[in-house]
Structures are given as structure tokens and as C-alpha cells.
Amino acid sequence: MACRRSVIVRWSPIALLLSLTACDPVESEDAGSTPQQVDLCEVSTRVFEPDCLSCHGADASPPDLTLEGARVGLVDVESGSYPGKILVVPGDPAGSLLFRKMNGTQAADEGDIMPIGAPSPADKVQTFERWIEGGAGLTCSP
């Protein structure tokens, strides 16, 4: 008959404390917490400027996604290319054509994914989604 030995790990108080307080370096939100508010300037800086302005700048294909262009031609504005589709519906990411195109969830009759070829990175989609969920305000925080 074979013997089984149990291995007992003894934790020092410091090791136990460190193991209990260690956290993932990725920020996470507690269940029920309110996501950080996102303003138009953050969306412009983090999403539009690096990924969209090469095609959707002031003198390029609509919509104009420069900061000033977004202030006047994005929220509650019908798409010039897809009649009846609103670019950004405050409080409703799924109802917002631009969000669906960035997220890759657009309908077959709503054109290509944006940017062309692949959906936007998840963190940028989330930033844009939070802005819309927060009411898609047209001002910037100080």
C-alpha cells in the first residue's frame, strides 16, 4: 500500500498579506460603480485624432471628426451616406451609427467597418461608448 503525503504550505504573515492585497495592473471597475465620465476632448484625443482624421478631417470625407467638426456635425445628426441613420444618439451607443461602425456591429446596409479593415481597438471603442452613454456632451472638462 502506497503512502500519500500532504504538502502543507506555511505562509508567513507578510506573504499572506501580500497575496491578499496583490492586484492586477489592469484597472477594473467594481460591480455597481459608475464608470468615469468621458468628454468630447478625450474622445477626440484618444479616438478620432489617431484613428479617424486621416480620412475624416475637415477637408476630407464626412463626417468631419475634428474637435470643431464633431461639435456641430456628429450628435443627433443624420448620416449623409446612410439616410435615416443617426451618427451619435446621446445615451444610446447601439443606436449610434458611428459606434456600430467602430465596433463592427453595423448592419449590412451601413457600410464598412471603421477604421477600414478592422474594428477599432477595444479601449477606444469603450471610450467612445462611455462618451455616448454619458450623454455625448459637446464640451470639454477643464
Image (tube, grey):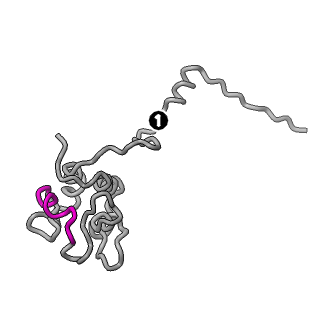
**Residue 105 on image: x %, y %:** 37, 69
**Residue 128 on image: x %, y %:** 29, 55
Depicted 78 relative to depicted 45: above or below = below
Please tell me which residue is depicted at 19% across the width and 63% down the height of the picture: 74
| Quarter of the figure with residue 47 | bottom left
**Residue 36 on image: x %, y %:** 32, 43
Please tell me which residue is depicted at 21% across the width and 56% down the height of the picture: 50
The residue where tag 1 is placed is 23
| Quarter of the figure with residue 120 | bottom left
Which quadrant is the C terminus positioned in? Answer: top left
Depicted 137 relative to depicted 102: above or below = above
Please give left or right for residue 15 compared with residue 84 in the image: right
Q: Nearer the viewer, residue 16 or 72?
A: 72
Residue lying at the far bottom of the rendered structure: 109
| Quarter of the figure with residue 115 | bottom left
The count of marks equals: 1
Q: Nearer the viewer, residue 126 or 84?
A: 84
Please give left or right for residue 12 compared with residue 25 in the image: right
Depicted 38 relative to depicted 110: above or below = above
Q: Nearer the viewer, residue 140 or 51?
A: 140
Depicted 77 relative to depicted 4: above or below = below
Please give left or right for residue 88 compared with residue 94 in the image: left
Please tell me which residue is depicted at 25% across the width and 63% down the height of the picture: 88
Q: Reply yes or no: does residue 35 show up in magenta.
A: no
Q: Nearer the viewer, residue 142 or 65?
A: 142
Mark 1 is on which residue type?
Answer: Cys
Within-10-Å neighbours for mark 1: few <14, some 14–19, many 20+:
few
**Magenta-drawn segment:** 67-78
Residue lying at the far top of the rendered structure: 13
Please tell me which residue is depicted at 91% across the width and 38% down the height of the picture: 1
